[in-house]
Amino acid sequence: MKTKAVRMYGKEDLRLEEFELPEIKKDEILAHIISDSVCMSTYKAIEQGTAHKRVPSDIAEKPVIVGHEFCGEIVKVGKKWADKFKPGQKFSIQPALNYKGSMAAPGYSYQYIGGDATYVIIPNEVMEMNCLLNYEGEAFFYGSVAEPMSCIVGTYHAMYHTTAGKYTHKMGIVKGGNMAILAGVGPMGIGAIDYAIHCRRRPGLLVVTDIDQARLDRAASIYTVEEAAKHGVKLVYVNTATTPDAEAYIMGLTGGKGYDDVMVFAPVKPVVEMGDRLLGKDGCLNFFAGPKAAPFMAEFNFYNVHYNSSHVVGTSGGNTDDMIESLKMMGDGRLNTASMITHVGGLNAVVDTVMNLPKIPGGKKLIYTNIDLPLTAITDFAELGKKDKLFKDLDEICARHNYLWNAEAEKYLLANAKAI
């Protein structure tokens, strides 16, 4: 079977190509990819090439398919897995396989599986590690953003606090405690706000900061103060660029006690250091934002490490349980990860999107792999719709959903966009 896919041949060398897939083996599965959301981690892999820990050294001869946040349908199942998986079944994948200690992952390391493709072959180890996950949602894009959401879920579970007089840790954020999400209205920060409000272990106070008022306003229109209050969370948005003595104001919201949990969503030295200063006793700082390159350093107050039990944790990705939780919460209607998506495009848009990702404003860029569509911001639908019926109709659909991407828009796009 032929597939069209975006493959990496080396550092900053991406190519959209059509090629033949081999016949599947008895322990493999043939699948049709429908959607893939573009991750900054893919850009980092392209920027580093074979220096990246997940990218093989021989990609010049054996190029790998990129994209690791994908969702699709099973087409054909090898004999080994025929009792567990069926053709027509929707699926999502947890790419962090950890198979026999290997760093190999779909979207970074494999010739025949990655999200930016029409058809792929799912290798045995994905099923062996229980990383091929059944997905029953209406819209494919939710299955794609389940992976980035799982990273956020994992971040919350990785937070920890000490137990006085004992050498045991209590995992998770402090229930009913003070929490701050710094630089928190990018696509992943938006997801973190959603989870904080709607998970079962919620903070009492949630402060979200950024320096972009437009993005803060958009976040506040999606996750309102009123909605948070319904779930017992006092939500405060703060523009640290315009608020006089912002750090003192943020600390004052706790009555001077400080924050039990601080998450940093930008690899910016002053933001990390402010997070450290905001920590209260036994406070945990999570450095979520992955720097583009080493070294990245910031000062940390070790006086407070010794006397105030301050501590730091970093997370990179989630595990399978985190992804299952993400899928379940979306299925239950407790999470709406559509808030993370600001652009949609077709497979033809992948190369330019990945290569220029840091320069493209907005949140998640969602790719539908079987169509030909330039990467387009949802906010541009209205203007483009003056000349193009496709965008006119998409704008009208999204307007009914607070200008968020949605299942109705996906269905319309897949039925009416130009095939690639």
Image (cartoon, rainbow, N blue to C red):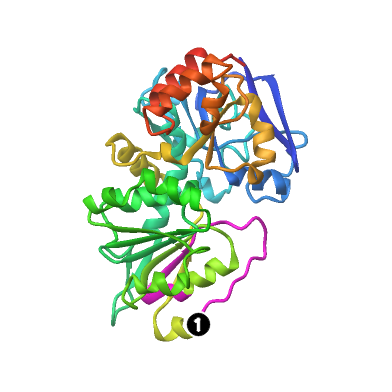
In this rendering, is residue 346 above or below 235? above
In this rendering, is residue 209 above or below 70? below
Q: Which residue is drawn at 57% across and 69% down?
A: 270
In the image, is residue 120 part of the stretch drawn in magenta? no
Q: Quadrant of residue 119?
A: top right
Q: Residue at x 63, y 47 (%)?
A: 54
Q: Residue 372 in the image: state x and y as whole percent.
A: 61, 19
- Which residues, given as a range, are shown in magenta? 277-301
The secondary structure type at the circle numbered 1 is helix
**Is 233 on the left-hand or right-hand side of 306?**
left
In this rendering, is residue 302 above or below 311? below
Work out whether residue 186 or residue 173 is closer to the camera in this orientation and state it.
186
Work out whether residue 68 or residue 193 is closer to the camera in this orientation and state it.
193
In this rendering, is residue 221 above or below 160? above
Q: Which amino acid does label 1 sit on?
A: Phe
For disc 1, the neighbor class at 10 Å (few under 14, some 14 to 19, many from 20) is few
The answer to whether residue 75 is seen in the rendering is no
**Is 29 on the left-hand or right-hand side of 160?**
right
Look at mark 1 in the image and give the residue it sits on: 302
